[in-house]
Image (cartoon, grey):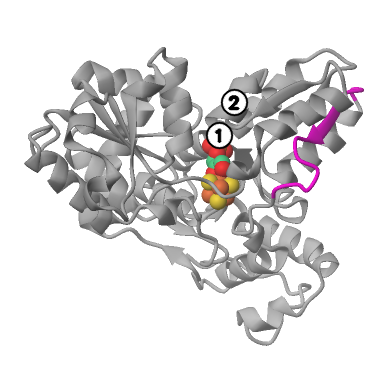
Amino acid sequence: MSVAIAPTIERPETCSLDNYLVLPDYSMDQRIAAARRLLGASTIILGHHYQRDEVIRFADFRGDSYKLSEEAARANARYIVFCGVHFMAESADVLAQDGQQVILPDLNAGCSMADMAEIGQVESCWEQLVDLGLTDERGNGITPLTYMNSTAAIKAFCGERGGLVCTSSNAAGAFRWAFSRTQKILFLPDQHLGRNTAYAMGLPLNEYVVWDPYMIMGGVTPERLRQAKVILWKGHCSVHQRFLPEHVDKVRTRYPGIQVIVHPECRWEVCQKADGIGSTERLIKIIQDAPSGSRFAVGTEIHLVNRMAKEFAHQNKKVITLDDSGCLCTTMFRISPQHLCWVLENLLEDNVVNRIQVPADVKHWARVALDRMLEIA
Ligand code: 13P
Ligand code: SF4
């Protein structure tokens, strides 16, 4: 597809990324807006809530991982520009139709949690569980369930063994679905989301074990593995794990009556002290629905907290971060206005840069796992 280029727009001589990275942020706005306009319906821009203001203001749709995967699945545009992190763009590619292309403006925008589970480690864990007789190869015995924040290969691994994907907004439904299939779940890769979800369903803490991929037999005895209902992978989000129960106590002392709401990637001890828990979309909704004069301390990524503080100030609602030092997701931050401008202006030249393409064999089973998630919702 060739897109007409307006003669009035000045472009750098070459569309090389280096030419963009030296430009100041303020000079990007007009160019991004112009490129966006020219690309028209050929392109949609999806933006995760943790993106910076200079980027998310150009998103056609913003949302949490679940909402963005739905948008990706129903998009008609030829190009899906994903302002988020690698696993999100991979999922969009898995859900995309033939002929659609998914672009991640900076390929270095990964996720440290997703990196904590490699497919080889997961296969080795599974073999050991099979050897113990806890499941067969196909997942008759244990349902593998992975958080969206994982590679497409792990999603495919789960899909092929009767399992599925979940996000922070539908983890409880996914756990129920998995328990209706088998008595045990292997939950990857976020131990905190897994623990918080299982506990909220009424499963006591002694029903879970944590599998450490760097230890022999995950560091768990065969007996404990036989007893456990949930095997949690030892992974976490370095942004959310920084919030501590002490932060909750401190903020409550400093602002009596303040409500503490946190993302379920936070530690169990933090979630237990919170007034509300939810995905990024849910956290926004809780504040939106609260009466004027409400005050919230929020345990999630700092860009979202700062944005809510600004946007809800007009409704006389106070929003602060749960931890004064603020928690930045450095990989989300990698998507800069310069990167966004670069990919859009390249599209104007019919040049697709930073395409995310999941191999066909992985795509098939990852799609099965993602479709199961979308169906149970
Ligand atoms: P949400 O699905 O709640 O947006 O979470 C994604 C994420 O990466 C949180 O760290
Ligand atoms: Fe990954 Fe944590 Fe960043 Fe979310 S906030 S993308 S889980 S590193």
Q: Give the secondary structure at mark 1.
A: loop
User: Callout 2 environment at 10 Å: few (<14), some (14 to 19), or many (20+)?
Assistant: many
The residue located at (36%, 56%) in the rendering is 99
Mark 1 burial class by Cα count in 10 Å: few <14, some 14-19, many 20+: many
Q: Nearer the viewer, residue 115 or 28?
A: 115
Q: Residue at coordinates 18% horizontally, 28% vertically from top-left? A: 226
Which residue has dot 1 on it?
A: 267
Q: Is residue 159 rendered to the left or right of residue 331?
A: left
Q: Is 53 located above or below residue 1 in the figure? A: above
- The stretch of residues the image draws in magenta is 315-327
Task: Compare residues 103 and 139 and report the one nearer the observer.
Answer: 139
x, y percentage for residue 118? 32, 56
* Viewport quadrant of the C terminus: top left
- Residue 159 against residue 181 in the figure, above or below: below
* Kind of residue sitting beneath label 1: Arg
Count of numbered tags: 2
**Residue 45 appears in the rendering:** no
Query: What is the three-letter code of the residue carrying label 2?
Result: Cys
Pinpoint residue 350: horizontal percent, then vertical percent.
52, 71
